[in-house]
């Protein structure tokens, strides 16, 4: 697996392959929670997450307040959300990769290989939009915006949107809402 992250619900671990996301509770077995083994574009939104198509689910984040599981469906250029009842939907991304869509609905925005996720204390979902060289956010109302990146400067102490990122991946958010991320090629 490319990632292995414990969720907020110990002793739970989430593990992925290129087409499945599994859950491991304290016990001998793992259970599929997302994915049907198919990488096609038949996403399965509105149905069971175990019947949905995902391709390279590189990152996950669990929101313990809402019970939602967020998944970077990286090769489909989308972020998916699994509700507590097990249904899946697209949170962000059209499947198209050139950057676009800030200020509008996240489901109409373009992401390119999203590879990192974190949920802030205010319910905002932060996404490493890796190949678009940005960290973006999706608010509880579904609006997307760029938090960091998109600029040309590699200087320090500059406005966040003036910063030049190169392939951000991992993201974390602390209890006060500060966002931490890796910038893998700078």
Image: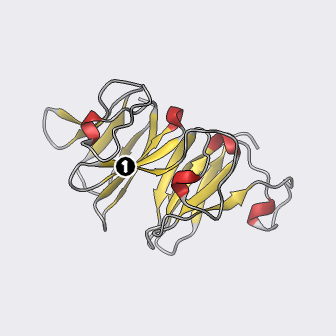
Q: Quadrant of the C terminus?
A: top right
Q: Which residue was labeled with disc 1?
A: 89
Question: Is 52 situated above or below 178?
Answer: above
Q: Label 1: few (<14), some or many (≥20) within 10 Å?
A: many
Q: Position of residue 85 (x, y in %)?
A: 20, 54
- Visible in this render: residue 169? yes
Image-quadrant location for residue 55? top left
Question: Residue drawn at (51%, 53%), measured in percent from left and top?
Answer: 107
- Visible in this render: residue 171? no
Q: Quadrant of the N terminus?
A: top left
Question: Residue drawn at (24%, 56%), measured in percent from left and top?
Answer: 84
Q: Position of residue 52 (x, y in %)?
A: 32, 36
Left or right of residue 164, residue 65 in this image? left
Left or right of residue 49, residue 136 in this image? right
Q: Position of residue 124 (x, y in %)?
A: 48, 66
Left or right of residue 97, residue 154 in this image? right
């Amino acid at each position: 697996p490319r990632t292995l992250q414990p969720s907020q619900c110990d002793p739970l671990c989430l593990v992925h392959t290129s087409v499945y996301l599994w859950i491991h509770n304290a016990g001998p077995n793992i259970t599929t929670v997302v994915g049907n083994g198919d990488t096609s574009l038949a996403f399965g939104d509105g149905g069971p997450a175990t019947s949905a198509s995902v391709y390279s689910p590189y990152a996950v984040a669990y929101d313990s307040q809402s019970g939602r599981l967020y998944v970077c469906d990286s090769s489909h250029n989308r972020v998916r959300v699994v509700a507590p009842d097990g249904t899946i939907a697209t949170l962000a991304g059209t499947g198209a990769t050139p950057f676009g869509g800030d200020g509008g609905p996240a489901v109409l925005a373009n992401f390119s290989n999203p590879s990192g996720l974190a949920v802030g204390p205010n319910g905002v979902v932060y996404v490493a939009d890796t190949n678009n060289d940005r960290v973006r956010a999706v608010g509880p109302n579904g609006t997307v915006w760029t938090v960091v990146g998109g600029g040309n400067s590699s200087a320090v102490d500059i406005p966040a949107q003036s910063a030049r990122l190169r392939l951000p991946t991992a993201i974390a958010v602390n209890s006060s809402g500060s966002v931490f991320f890796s910038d893998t090629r700078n």
